[in-house]
Image (spheres, rainbow, N blue to C red):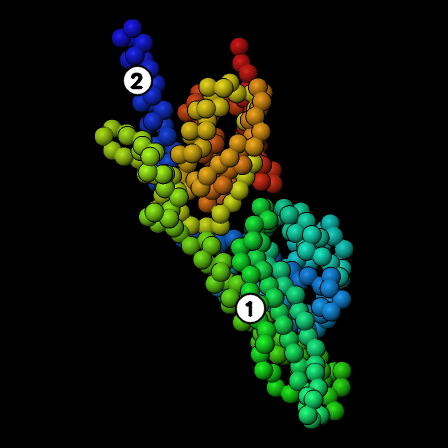
Amino acid sequence: MPHVRTTAFRTTAFRAACLAVLALGSAYAAPARAQTKPNVVVMGEDADEDAVPRGNRIFQRVIHELSETMNLRGYNVYDETAVAMGFTQANRVRRRDAELIEVARAVQNPPLDVVAVFQIYASASKSAYSDIVRPEIRIPGRLLNVRTGQSLGSFEVAGLQLPPLPQGCDRECLLERVGAEAKTVAADLAAALTAKLDGVIAPRRGADAGAAPPDAAPVPVGGAVAAAPGGEGCGGLPSAYVVRLSGFSAQEVQAAEEYMAAFRCYEHHRPVRASGASTEYWYETRSDSARLGRNLRLMLEHMSAPGQVQFSGNTFVISRVATR
């Protein structure tokens, strides 16, 4: 019996050491560098008949201003037409948000993380007491996580006192004047949305860093205490993935769940579906897909479980390869 207890202790200690390696290893795998900001695409929703349609010069000035401001703030901003022209009809108008989200999800190269959706409402109203005509502009915008559909923030710029239009202002004059004012309003909207996005991807530290709950004991390794999940400096866009385990035994599934909860920048996970042959998790983390895939491959290596890791969209499929 002492031999059995010794073997069990060694197995537990080995697993604890592996958990600590996976939790801390990525911190030493590469030199420290700034967190990569998410890929953003700016899209206009013009399904409302009162909204300025896509292709209008006011629309173009607004989308260019939004893209330029977010680009100067360090975000990787991609042009919708350039990345989606291979599978969608260019210059479609009166599109609803469902179509915009589907197009953003369909783009694979480059993978898009955030879609900034805006609308433009522009009009001109005449004063009740004189012949003065003032333009009125309202631009609401919001940020959505492409993979999960999570709302990352919204803002609306409206209610500004705009200069009146000159006398005899024809359609050309109206488009130019309103377009110039809309560009200024769009700059304010872009500043607000980028500030919200900065807050979402900012590194979280201390109690807000996704640390383990107080009743969860830290993993001891050689007298030291491993870093809690979601350790210091975990910045980046919170991402959610579907992780599907196929062909693993119940004991291996339990071990894999412990490993995944120890990965660096882990947020939380939730079982979605389980059967005798496969188990599926909704897994949220601040790691990118490359780091998560690398950790999953290391997990199989530490478990001495031959298998394959496949990735597509936001789904990781981990298949156990049966051997004699």
Q: Is residue 102 left or right of residue 185?
A: right
Label number found at residue 189: 1
Q: Residues within 10 Å of mark 1 (few under 14, many from 20)?
A: many
Task: Tell me which residue sits at (48%, 32%) in the image.
Answer: 296
Q: Is residue 266 visible?
A: yes
Q: Is residue 32 visible?
A: no
- Give the image location of residue 138, x and y in percent: 63, 72
Q: Residues within 10 Å of mark 2 (few under 14, many from 20)?
A: few
Task: Tell me which residue sits at (30%, 12%) in the image.
Answer: 5
Is 224 drawn above or below residue 123 in the view shown?
A: above
Q: Quadrant of residue 154?
A: bottom right
- Give the image location of residue 256, x and y in percent: 46, 27
Q: Secondary structure at mark 2?
A: helix
Asked if the residue under mark 2 is in contact with the one under mark 1, i.e. CB atoms within 8 Å, the reply is no
- Give the image location of residue 231, x and y in percent: 36, 43
Task: Name which residue type carries label 2.
Answer: Phe
Task: Tell me which residue sits at (59%, 46%) in the image.
Answer: 147
User: How many numbered marks, from 0 up?
Assistant: 2
Task: Tell me which residue sits at (46%, 50%) in the image.
Answer: 236
Which residue lies under the disc numbered 2? Answer: 9
Is 256 drawn above or below residue 161 in the view shown?
A: above
- Give the image location of residue 300, x and y in percent: 46, 26
Rendered-image quadrant of the N terminus: top left
Is 319 drawn above or below residue 153 in the view shown?
A: above
